[in-house]
Image (cartoon, rainbow, N blue to C red):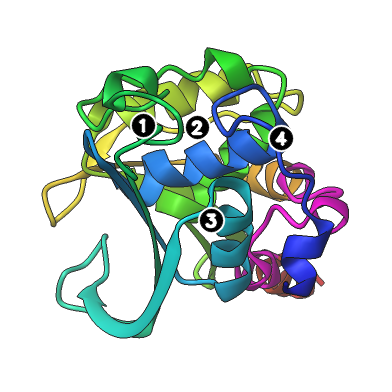
Amino acid sequence: MSETEQRIEVPADPLAGHPASAYFWGHVAGSGDVSDDRIEVVTNDEASAQALAAVAGGDLEHETTSRDYAHDTSITRTEDEYTLSIVDDGDTGLLGRSGALGLPVDGRGNYRFGAFSSYDRELLRGLLEGCGTICFKSSSGTVGISFVHEDRELLELTQELLDDCPVETPYGDLGETSSGGYWFGVDDDAAPEFGTWLYEECEETGLFAPSRRRKLERSLEQADAYDE
């Protein structure tokens, strides 16, 4: 068992209201695929992949992939990719449910996150790590946080979660990406406080991607240095 898995408090039911299940389903919605007999979720961070596996079980596979950057398809990135696969074992169904309709996301745009309403930070963290970007904008000396996904309804739901966020987090309108999906960004002025809140206390739970947190910390440091 890895150090990450040892820190995680695993819920008795991966569909019940719990910080770990909220984080898991945020990832599934952001970078996963759900069918009647399988859930697959992809992450670029090994520790995050181990955390997701600790929550819901399944098998992990690692490979190196090249893909187009979401905002600009002329740019290609090569990165590690960890895929967690959870399949119907034929006895208890998929995560103990008889089909995808018993899950909080069924792969057809029907997202039901009500069970996780008390754990919006973990849910948003999973969504950001699943379909979000963090960067330092050298042109303005600010931190950029955005969400990118092919499903417009998921991004609209993410905006609703931001509306209820305990830190004020204004954001821009939905726009289209060059790859045919959608995106929106958190206002630059709000990004530092939102990002800091999003990763508060995550070390205690293990429910985070260390590489993504490091990217946030580096971006915040660059922004502070720019102001000086």
Query: Label 1 crowding class (10 Å Cα cut-off): few <14, some 14-19, many 20+?
Result: many
Distance from Cα at disc 2 to Cα at disc 1: 11 Å
The numbered dot on residue 89 is: none
Quadrant of res 209: bottom right
Q: Position of residue 86 (x, y in %)?
A: 38, 51
* Residue at the image point whose x is 86% and y is 49% from the top: 201
Image quadrant containing the C terminus: bottom right
Quadrant of res 193: top right
Mark 3 or mark 1, which has the lower sequence index? 3
Q: Position of residue 78 (x, y in %)?
A: 32, 86
Q: Please name the residue that numbered disc 3 is placed on.
A: 144
Mark 3 or mark 4, which has the lower sequence index? 4
Amino acid at dot 4: Pro
Q: Please name the residue that numbered disc 4 is placed on.
A: 19
> Is residue 224 in sight in this rendering?
no
Amino acid at dot 1: Leu
Q: Please name the residue that numbered disc 2 is placed on.
A: 171
SS label for mark 3: strand
